[in-house]
Image (spheres, helix red, strand yellow):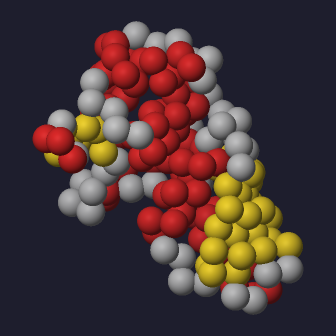
Amino acid sequence: MTLKEQRRALILGAVSEQAIATQEQLLTCLAASGVEATQATVSRDIRDLGLKKKSKKGGVACYAPATAENKSTHRYALLENSVLSAEAVGNMVCVRCGGGLAQGACAALDEIALKDVAGSLAGEDTIFLLCRSDTAARRVREEIDRYAAKPDN
């Protein structure tokens, strides 16, 4: 995973899990994860990831992941930038992610609402998906492979 992919996955994870209102807060989150970036870089990442500010409780506008209206381009950016591999084992799928990226990727998978998944559990770099059958696990793994596919360079 490139530094750019890691940084963008961390940004998506942060705005999915926390109330982030400023680019400075994003820079702080990145620094806490050991990733240094400039404000200009974070600004480009926000634009390229399709993040929009939404009002939260208390009237503070915070960054939010792409919505249904703007997901067409960036819908699976988090998965593309965090999933390294997926393997079906019995009725489970083990998804490997870059360090510290599993929770954000798991949240994205939960949002997608894969019909064959009964539940999910994320650690730091691994996600376990409990599927309804062995066959369902193979279908889910194939679907994750499509979501996480890197475009040819």
In the image, what residue occupies the spot 28% across and 38% down?
63
Relative image position of residue 110 (x, y in whole percent): 51, 66
Pick the front one: 116 or 71: 116
Quarter of the view holding residue 125: top right
As drawn, the residue found furthest toward the front would be 58
Q: Is residue 70 left or right of residue 96?
A: left
Write the residue at 62% across / 41% down.
101
User: Which residue is depicted at the point 53% across and 16% down?
Assistant: 31
**Image quarter for residue 2?**
top right
66 shown above or below 1 = below
Q: Nearer the viewer, residue 88 or 14?
A: 14
- In the displayed structure, 89 sits above or below 96; it is below
Quarter of the image where the C terminus is located: top right
- Residue 85 location, x and y as percent? 73, 54
Instruction: Say if residue 145 shows up in the picture.
Output: yes
Q: Residue at x 31, y 21 (%)?
A: 23
Question: Toward the viewer: 17 or 148?
Answer: 17
The extreme right residue here reads 90
In the picture, measured across the screen, residue 136 lies left or right of residue 65, that is right
Using the image as rendered, state which of residue 92 and residue 47 is in the foreground: 92
Instruction: Pinpoint residue 112: horizontal percent, then vertical percent.
Output: 46, 68
